[in-house]
Amino acid sequence: MIAPMIRKVKGATVQSVAPYLASAGEQAARLERWKAFVQENGTALRQQTAQEATKLGFAPQAFAPFDSLLRRDFRPINAAQCLTMGEDALAPLVARDGKGQYIVTTVVNVPRAEADALKQQLDAELKESMSHAKAPKTVAEDTESVWTFTPKSMNESVARHLSQDFSYIGWVCGAIVFGFLWLSFRRFSVAVLAFFPMVVSWLWILGSMSIFGLSFNLVNVILATFIFGQGDDYSIFVTEGLLYEYTYGRKLLAAYKRSILLSAVIMLIGVGTLAFAQHPALSSLGGLTIVGMGSVVAATLLLPAPVFGWWTRQRVASPWASPLSVVRLVQSALSRNAWALTHCCGIVWEDRTIGGETSGENTLAQTSSTDVATANLGGTKKNVGDFSKNVGDFSKNVGVFSKNVGENFEDVGRFSRNDGDTQKKAVQSSKDNEDFTEKEGVEIAEQPTATGDTATCVTNNGQPFPNKVHTLHEMPFIGVWTAQDVRVKRWALRQHPEWEWMTLATWSLEKCRQLWSQGRQPMLEVGASAELLHRFAQQLQTLGETVVRPLIVAGEARVFPSGTRVLEHGRLTVAWGAPLAGEGDATGFVCKWYAHCVKTQGKLTDLRALVPHVVASYSHKIEGAQARVARHLSDLHTINDQLALWEAQYTAQQPAKACQPLRVEDDGETAVLMALLHPEREFVALVEDQDAAALLLHLRCRPENLQVAPY
C-alpha cells in the first residue's frame, strides 16, 4: 500500500520487517513453490550432495539434517511465531508491550520537508482502504492498531498526554495540600488565605509560559512540581507571620519575607542560568525556573498581606468589627429582608418595649432560655441557630414578664435560687434606675391607669392589630428613635406596625394626640446630629408640657459596627428610656438627653450581650485562643464568681485605688468583661506570661480603661 507512495518521494528509503512477516497467502504460495522445487530437483540434489561430500571427506551422515529438511512437510505459521523466532534480530523494529502484543515499526526515511505530507497521504490511504473492507468490526479493530507518526507528531502527542496527566496530578495535589493546610491552621478562611497565592502564582506561570512560548516536557515537569512545593512553603511562612503579628503585634513578617526572597534568589542563580544552555531540555529548565520562581515569589510577597488585612478588617475603625466569615457575609446580604434579619442572621432581638416600661423596670426580666450567654460566639458555638429560631418565643416571654413588675421579681427570685448573686444584682440594678429616674426625670402629669382602660392598636384603615393591646398610660408620650443603622428600623417596621413614623418636618402635637386616641404610638425620627436634636428641643419648648421617651437600642454599635455593612453575631435590646419633658434651655436638654441615653445603654448591657463579641475578638488568634476563650466564657457562673470577687476587692479598698489591679489567669477575657461592664473605672490587668500580655494588649475590643502590665 505504501510502496507506490514512497517511490514517488526522491531519496526515500525503507527499513521494515515486512519481508520476514509474510501473510498466510504469501506463505502458502511460497510453500507451493518450495514443494515444486523439491519434487523436481530433490532426488538429484540429494545424490549430488552425497557424491560431493564423499569426495571432500565428509562422513555419510554429515548431511542427514539437510536431507530431512528436503523431506519435511512445511505449513504456514502465524506472525507471533515468526516474531518469536526473530525477536532478537529484529529488536530495533519489533517490540512487545505489557500485554504480550507485538508492536512492529516500519521506518521510512524521507527529507524533513516531505515528512508531514507523506504522513497525511498514508493516513488518508489507510482510512480509505479500511472503509472498503468487508468486515467493519474487524477493520475498526485493525484501524486502531495501525497508525502513522513522525518525530514531531510523536513529541506533540507525548506533550499532550503529559499535560493531561500533569493537570490531573496538579488538581489532586492541590486538594491534598489544601486539606493539610485546613488541618494545620484549623480554620477554613486561613487555609484559603494560605492557598490563594499558590493558585494565583500558578495562573501567572501558565500565562507567562504561553507568552514566552514555553511548554512542559519530560524534563521540566519535574521542576514544576518542585516550584509548586516551594510556593506552598513560602505561602505558609507568610501566613504564619501575618497571624503572629495580628496576635501579638510583634513585627515578624519582614524577616520572613527577607528569608523567602534570599531563598528564591539562590535558586534563580543556581537553576535559572540553565536558560542560556544550548541543549533544549536544559534551556527549558532554566526558563521555567525564572518564570515559576518569579511568579511564586511575587504572589507570596504581594498578595497575602492586603487580603489578610481586608479579611480581618484592620481598616475598620469600630473596635467591635471581628474578622470576616463566609456565614456572616451571607447573613449580611440577607439582612436586607426583615424576616431574615430577625430569624436567620444570628442576632438575638430582646424587645422590652411591649408594655411601655422603662429600661430600668425591664432590667429584671429574664427569658426562659438559659443558654443566651453562649449564643452567637462568632461561629464557634452551635447554638446560634437556636437563639435565632427562638426569637419569637423570646419576645413573647418578655411581654409576659413585662405585664407585672411583681411577676418579674418572682421570676428573679426563682432564678436566684440557682445563682445567689443574681437577685442581689437585679435589685441593685432596679434601685439604680429608680435613683436615675428621680435625678434626671421630670414631673409628669398623671395619666389614667385604671385597670381595664385599654386601647387596641389599629392600622391606618381602622383594622385592629392582633395581639397588640396596651394600657392607656403607655401612649401619651412621643417616642424618639435613636438607632443609627437602617436595619434596626427595618426590624422595627416589621415587629411594631403600631408605631407611626414621623420626621421633624411632618410631626405635630395634634397628630400625636390623634394617634394616641387610636391606640397608636408616635415615633419621631430626629437624627443623630446635635443640631437636629437642638432643633427638636426648641420645638418642644413651644408646645409646653410634652413628654418624650427615647427608644434605646443597646448593642447596636456592637452588632452593626460603624464603617462596614457586615454584621456581627450578638444581642440587641430594645427598650424605652425614662420620660423626659422638653422644658428649660434647649442646650441643656440636649446634654441631658445624651447623658440619659448613654447611661440607659450601660444599664441594658450585661454579660449576655458582651460575651459573643469578646469571643469573636479572639478570632484568627494563633494557638487556639478563640476556642479556649469560648469554652471559658460558656460557663457564666464561673465568670460571675470571678467578677464578684474583683468587685468585692474593689469595695474593700479604703480608700479605693484610682486603678484597680486585676490578676489575669486566663487569656484576658474576664478582665475585658470587667472593664466593659464598668467603663467609669480604671483597671490594670496583671499578666504573668509575656505572650498572654501581648495578646491582651493587642486585642481589638480591649477598652481604654483597661491597661496591661506584667507581674
Image: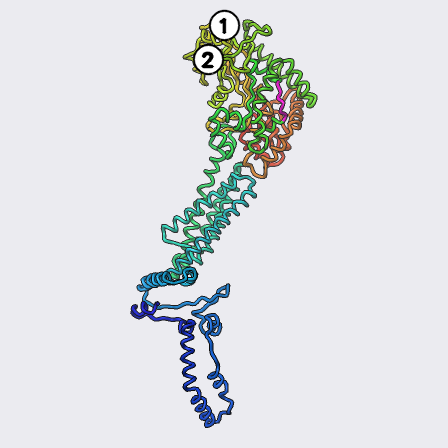
Vertical side of 78 occupied by 203: above or below: above
Residue stretch in magenta: 365-370
Q: Secondary structure at mark 1?
A: loop
Give x and y (percent) for residue 232.
50, 47
Q: Secondary structure at mark 2?
A: loop
Can residue 621 be seen here? Answer: yes
Closer to us: 171 or 632 = 171
Give x and y (percent) for residue 664.
63, 31
Residue located farthest toward the bottom when viewing the structure as drawn:
55
Q: Where does the C terminus fall, quadrant-wise?
A: top right
The residue singled out by tag 1 in the image is 545
Q: Nearer the viewer, mark 2 or mark 1?
A: 2
Give the CA separation, mark 2 to mark 1: 27 Å
Q: Look at 48% across and 29% down and name the residue there.
A: 334
Relative to 66, is 401 on the left or the right? right
Type of the residue with mark 2: Asn
Q: Which mark is residue 274?
A: none
Type of the residue with mark 1: Glu
Give x and y (percent) for residue 306.
45, 38
Magenta span includes 465: no
Give x and y (percent) for residue 532.
43, 15
Answer with the quarter of the image where residue 44 lies: bottom left
The residue singled out by tag 2 in the image is 460
Circle 2 residues within 10 Å: few <14, some 14–19, many ≥20? few
The prevailing secondary structure element of the residues shown in magenta is loop
